[in-house]
Image: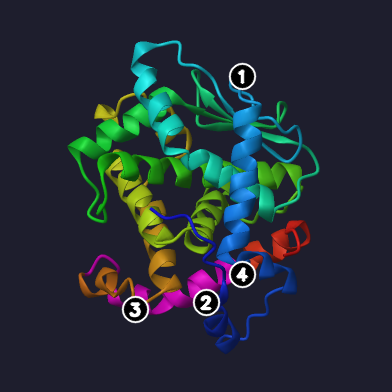
Amino acid sequence: MDHLARGVGDHRQQYRNRQIQRMSSLSIFCMGYKKRVWATLLFLVSWIMGFGNGVAGQREGFLLIMDAPTQPASTWAWELLRNSRRMETVIGVLQASFSLPRPLTFRFGEGEGPVYDPQRVEITIPYPFIADIAHLLSEHPAPTAVHSEQTDTLDVVEWVVYHELAHAFVDLYNLPVLGREEDAADALATLLAIELVEDGGRMALTAADLLARVAANAKNTPNASFWNEHTVDQQRFSQVVCWVYGSDTTTFAPLANSGTIPHQRAQRCPDAFSTMAQGWWRLLDRYIKPA
């Protein structure tokens, strides 16, 4: 999946029609492709130069650590991340987009998770969790899967990274949350996928479908701690699908035509997505870096 600066331009006219005002600083997401590429390349260079034991070279903003695997079963996930450079790209885009009051570390390694630790200001994504995703996708490929199993695994991992990032933003920015924080985290994960990633809607659908399959078969899910702690259920899957459809009813028309989204609910999805996006952009406006 190509990671481009899709921006919010494609959706702004829809929001204007619904009288939704976005803040001017959201132009960060309309940065040109070349600027995004340079931001990512600069991060990659600094990360590689400071890699050593896995610690990113910079010491402010978004930090990336990839611990060497200590279990044979974790090696596959570690190699997938190292070879793809997907997470370096993700962190580079976040670094270019958001200001943080304190450094936030993304650690890939062993242990429990995915989870955000407010004491350490650290998001942990375990290698076994990534291996579990690959295993689940191999047994039950998502209907939206159009790429390789490895790419789809990385897509789900990236969506989960955005989900945990939402918890970090709530903590670091002291953001108010109405309703369940897990639902708010799903919303931001889906929004960032749609706005920051080419074909990001499909990424969110792949993740949502996997969550739904886990919910339906939780007893047979390996290492199900993440899924259990995050209250995976069909309602969350349906909400993510509705947001994706509402973001682009033309591209994702098959979701409504196939009955994946009931007709009456499908009519409400564009407003649901607009309301969700407006709410998050208003909360994050002051922390978005100028273009």
Residue at the spot of label 3: 250
The label nearer to you, 3 versus 1, is 1
Task: Please report contact status of discs 3 and 1: CB closer than 8 Å, yes or no.
Answer: no
Residue at the spot of label 2: 11
Task: Please report contact status of discs 3 and 4: CB closer than 8 Å, yes or no.
Answer: no
Q: Which mark is residue 52?
A: 1
Task: Please report contact status of discs 4 and 1: CB closer than 8 Å, yes or no.
Answer: no
The image's colour scheme reads rainbow
Please state the horizontal and vertical placement of residue 54, each as a whole percent of the image.
Answer: 58, 22
Secondary structure mainly formed by the magenta segment = helix
Is 146 left or right of 193, judged from the image as shown? left
Residue situated in front as seen by the camera: 283 or 196: 196
Query: Which comes before the other along the chain, label 2 or label 1?
Result: 2
Alpha carbon of mark 4 to alpha carbon of mark 2: how far? Answer: 11 Å
Residue 224 in sight from this viewpoint: no
Q: Residue furthest bottom?
A: 17
Q: Secondary structure at mark 3?
A: loop
Query: Which comes before the other along the chain, label 3 or label 4?
Result: 4
Q: Which mark is residue 30?
A: 4
